[in-house]
Amino acid sequence: MKGVMLKILLLLTAVTILMIPIVGNGVIKAREINDVTESEEKQIEKVVMEKMKKGKIPGLSITIVKDDKTVYQKGFGFSNLKEERPVTSQSLFELASTSKAFTALAILNLVESGQIELNDNVTTHIPWLKVLYKGKEMPITIEQTLHQTTGIPASTINMIPISNEDRALEETVRTLNGIELDSEPGKMFQYATINYDILGFIIEQVTGGTYEYYMEEAILKPMELNNTYLFGNEEINNQMTTGYKIGFLKPQRYEAPIYRGNKPAGYIISSGEDMAKWLKIQMGTMNEMDLDKGIIKKSHIADRAVDMVGNEVFYAGGWFLEPNEQVTHDGMNPNYSTYVTFNNKEKIGVAVLGNLSSNQVQNIGVEIKEILQGNIVSSDKEDSNQYLDQLALSTILVLSILILVALFLIIKVLLKVYRKQLHVKHDGKKSIIKLTLSLLCVLGFSLFIYLVPSILLHGYSWEAVFIWSPQSVQVALYTIYSASWLIYILIILKVYFKKVKTSPRDNKADAT
């Protein structure tokens, strides 16, 4: 899922480059736990309030852990705007791509129990899955899948089917059968969310049960993460936050499609309260749990044989390993965002959960981390969704004016035809050529717009774009098509009708 919004931003930018300003909204907060210094608290809450307002985020859960203590835990804003339910430490959010670290632990747990090996070929457990590199079948290993070095294209996120069926994981993995890899397995890092769906399906194949059952029994219960879930149900509905995405300059409630087949990579549900436990588990400061601490440490071991992800950054088991023992992952779903980071040396951890798809959640998390580490760093990663929304709204406004002008001119021509002030031209082939050329132009333009996601985003569809982007983007697309065809209709009328010429005798008769 990482990088999807940036690609959609480039997509709409290809259609229009207009922008308009945006305004903010208010934020409320609910105090729960606070054991940070007064100076840190002021800085943290200043950052949270500013970024929430800027990003129009309805609700946030902030959790800070130092050693084995939860030193700061607060809810900001609302879990549901209409009902004005405040966010609390028990409020539930989709974890998006930070779910991957949970799946990584499950895989390493199977390794520890001797049921699989990291150097196993994926086909050992999924015999029918064949992938190609330069047309030749290539093996990929569980370790390569764990470390995102399989070469599977990032655009495969577009191939994940909408499904809530029990076979959703298998259906998702089957979309990869026969796929051409972008690089030779094990040679370079390429983030593809579907890698972790492969791991989820391996868990099912090895254990003989569902991914969800194994995660609950072998991972969540031993870690005592009692407020972390793999299914939405009546039991959790009262605590589940409502997901939103930006549309027409404000957060809009959005019911995202169900991607059960992508659960291992992005759809585990948890709360700020459980994220505090999760951070302590990751830092090794929570002693009371039945899960082997050794697999936690192993999940922090990266594949350093491949090129770095970024500036001294490597990928481990669902985590990015940064310099100075900083471990981080962010996530973004169509209507939720997360940011989780901790330092294994300083034993400080931060988790930020938001019920809006926004880069501001990551900005908040980064700045809180820097405040706690005594640094003065401003994180201002551009909110691609907001930019897209502004771009789409500008497109709608400009083209709406064009549509109104076109409609006015079309009606004007039709009225003249009705009044017999215009009549059909008899230009023969000349008119046909003009009509054909204009039709080809509008058809070509329409086809180009239809293919833009596939061309620029390496196989994405407009359906996927609509799911991930602001609601205004879909309206903008329809506006573009409407304007194009109305202009074409106007061209037809101009080509086929001409003004009726009156003779001097007619004018004289009219005068009398």
Image (tube, rainbow, N blue to C red):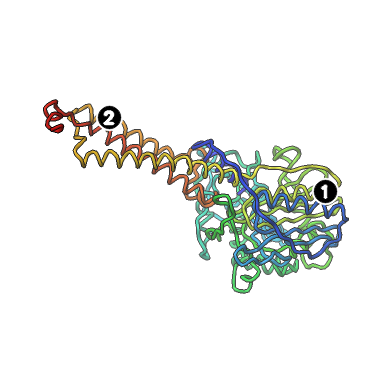
Q: Which residue position holds label 2?
A: 434
- Residue at the farthest bottom position: 235
Q: Between residue 307 and residue 430, name the one nearer to us.
A: 430
- Would residue 103 be found to the left or right of residue 476 on screen? right
Seen at 54% across and 58% down, the residue is: 256
Seen at 70% across and 40% down, the residue is: 309
- Would residue 402 be found to the left or right of residue 70 on screen? left
Q: Position of residue 360 (x, y in %)?
A: 68, 49
Q: Are marks 1 and 2 in contact (CB under 8 Å)?
A: no
To which quarter of the image does residue 430 belong?
top left
Image position of 475 with respect to 422: above or below: below
Q: Between residue 161 and residue 424, name the one nearer to us.
A: 424
Image position of 18 with respect to 75: above or below: above
Q: Is residue 120 visible?
A: no
Seen at 88% across and 55% down, the residue is: 37
- Would residue 72 be found to the left or right of residue 497 on screen? right
Seen at 72% across and 55% down, the residue is: 352
Q: Which residue position holds label 1?
A: 371
Q: Position of residue 483 (x, y in %)?
A: 39, 41
Q: Secondary structure at mark 2?
A: helix
Crowding at mark 2 (Cα within 10 Å: few <14, some 14-19, many 20+): some
